[in-house]
Image (cartoon, helix red, strand yellow):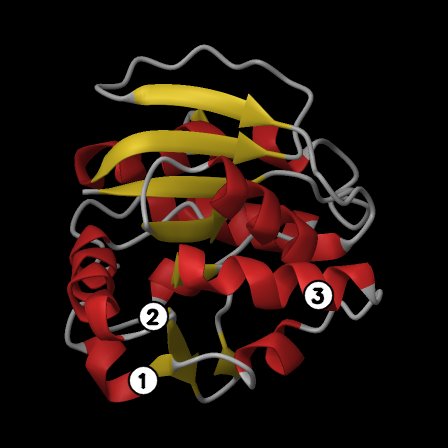
Amino acid sequence: MVTSVVLAGGKSSRLGVDKALAIVGGKSLIQRVIERLTPISNQILIVGSLHHFNFSSGCSIEYRGDLYPGKGPLGGIYTGLAASKSFYNLIVACDMPFLNIELLRYMIKLSPDFDVVVPKVKKGIEPLHAVYSKNCLDSMKRQLDKGELSIAQFLSMVKVRYVEQEECQNFAPQLLSFFNVNSQADLAQANILAKGEDIQL
């Protein structure tokens, strides 16, 4: 079991509404994320959101404002790691409605020998669908204090296990675990996907 950190600090400018509250398959995006994370988490932190949602889950849900406001995902990840009760932490974005639990479990199992476990698919790395250890805190803080916000730059400074696309597809054949909602078109597609009864995430 790990702590799961949900980053909910984006401005949702392309979507036009609060991304966390957008509805997919009758549930808000953040509710869908929480439901998927609950079975594998002993703590869930929502970072960057001022909302206090009501969730029925088997683990505690806490809220944290960004320690580095306006510093993007790296600041949100740092905030979550600093507040977490766990050494290993699953970091995800609030707009990923089809998180694949078996893929996440696989990544968690890989984490003991690494500072970060992150998927690497053809379109690039997925740093907001990754496992980070508390070993990352010092390097992240140094980078944030210098105003350097690149996650790729941060990853070059720590021990990383990249989970290649073929590995990911053993659990998520269509790679929909990485599907995120940034626009109205994405939201419409997510609602179509959510209707599939036998969807292979």
As drawn, 74 above or below 188? below
- Disc 3 marks which amino acid? Arg
Residues at discs 1 and 2 in contact (Cβ within 8 Å): yes
Residue 184 in picture, x, y percent from top left: 68, 48
Residue 72 in picture, x, y percent from top left: 74, 54
At a point 63% along the width and 47% down the height, the residue shown is 76
Residues at discs 3 and 2 in contact (Cβ within 8 Å): no
- Disc 2 marks which amino acid? Leu
Instruction: Rate crowding at label 2 as few (under 14), some (14 to 19) or many (20 or more) other CA atoms within 10 Å.
Output: many
Sequence order check, earlier mark of 3 and 2: 3
Instruction: Quickly name the residue at label 2.
Output: 175
| Front label number (3 vs 2) | 3
Q: Real-space Cα distance between discs 3 and 2?
A: 33 Å
At a point 83% along the width and 47% down the height, the residue shown is 70
Q: Real-space Cα distance between discs 1 and 2?
A: 8 Å
Instruction: Quickly name the residue at label 1.
Output: 165
SS assignment at label 2: loop
Residue 67 in picture, x, y percent from top left: 71, 39
* Residue 118 position by quadrant: bottom left
| Front label number (1 vs 3) | 3
| Front label number (1 vs 2) | 1
The tag on residue 142 is 3
Instruction: Rate crowding at label 1 as few (under 14), some (14 to 19) or many (20 or more) other CA atoms within 10 Å.
Output: some
Residue 125 appears in view: yes
